Amino acid sequence: MSYVVSMKRDPLVEILRTDFGRKKMRNKSYSLRSYSRDLGVDPSNLSKIINQQKSIGVRLRKTLAKKLGFEVNEIASWLMPAAQEKTSDKEYSQHGVEVFQIVSEWQHYAILELFKLKEFTFSFEEVAQWLGISLNEARKSIKRLQDAGLLKFGQELKEWLPSESSSSSILSIATSKAHREQQKQILEGGIDALKMVPIEKRSQSSMTMAIDTKKLTEAKQLIKTFRRDMGRLLASGKSLDEVYQLSISLYPVTKNRIKNKTKGELCE
């Protein structure tokens, strides 16, 4: 059940490819020369790097990391030996930063969770309806999940299937602009839920306290344990019917199920 992304290829190369692909998708005339100009890199060198014909030196690696929105110290985690890429919980998989960069937007992991729901039958239209996103975004998200190796088309049954049965575990040392953006989206989703979702369908609370900061490492471990215990509890039922987001705010991300049972309309 554990899944660890192969790190044989330089993760920074994968990130460059993904970033360039997204820019190209938004602007068909955007070229590798345009990308090299934006990064401040020689076009010929960038082409060789992306095609894995040339390795990336430390100085250039730092330059590219900064241009891509990473902190300089974040690239250290990309150079760690594969032996250190472990997750302490076998029920959770570990995705490298190069994979997370592709699927960092909130809906990608929500799509993988949809496959666990009893009432979910895959189609692009169903994904769009369940998550409240456009049909075009649903199609793009499925393609990204496929590119990342997290979703595959099973030739035998002629259907889409997640390549693993568990959600991801992103190492805290591999934080990046993509991780920060995802957390921002999740927090904004919590604000929307506060306005739109009835109290019986969510849980949102906070606590103000004086603390001993030397205890923070231990506190983070307790929070991780709590998250996973909560995940096991809520996933242990025989009839999974919704996909929720937990950021201590616990709220649904499946839109078409948040309905007023008598009026059949979205709760405001």
Image (spheres, rainbow, N blue to C red):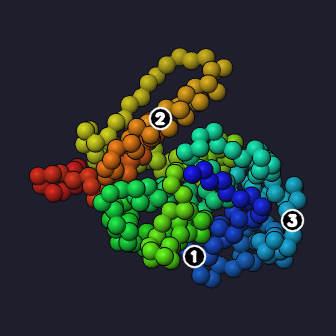
Dot 3 amino acid type: Ser
- 1 or 3: tag closer to the N-terminus: 1
Q: Amino acid at mark 1?
A: Met
Q: Provide the secondary structure element on which disc 3 rests.
A: loop
Residue on which the image places disc 1: 25
* Above/below status of 199 relative to 184: above
Query: In the picture, residue 100 is in which quadrant?
Result: bottom right
Foreground tag (1 vs 3): 3
The mark found on residue 229 in the picture is 2
The foreground one among 125 and 105 is: 125
Left or right, residue 160 beside residue 36? left
Mark 3 crowd level (few <14, some 14–19, many ≥20, 10 Å Cα): some
Question: Farthest residue in the bottom direction?
Answer: 29
As measured in the structure, the alpha-carbon distance from the residue carrying label 1 to the one carrying label 3 is: 26 Å
- For marks 2 and 1 on the same chain, the one whose residue lies earlier in the sequence: 1
- Residue picked out by circle 3: 55
Image check: 171 left or right of 199?
right
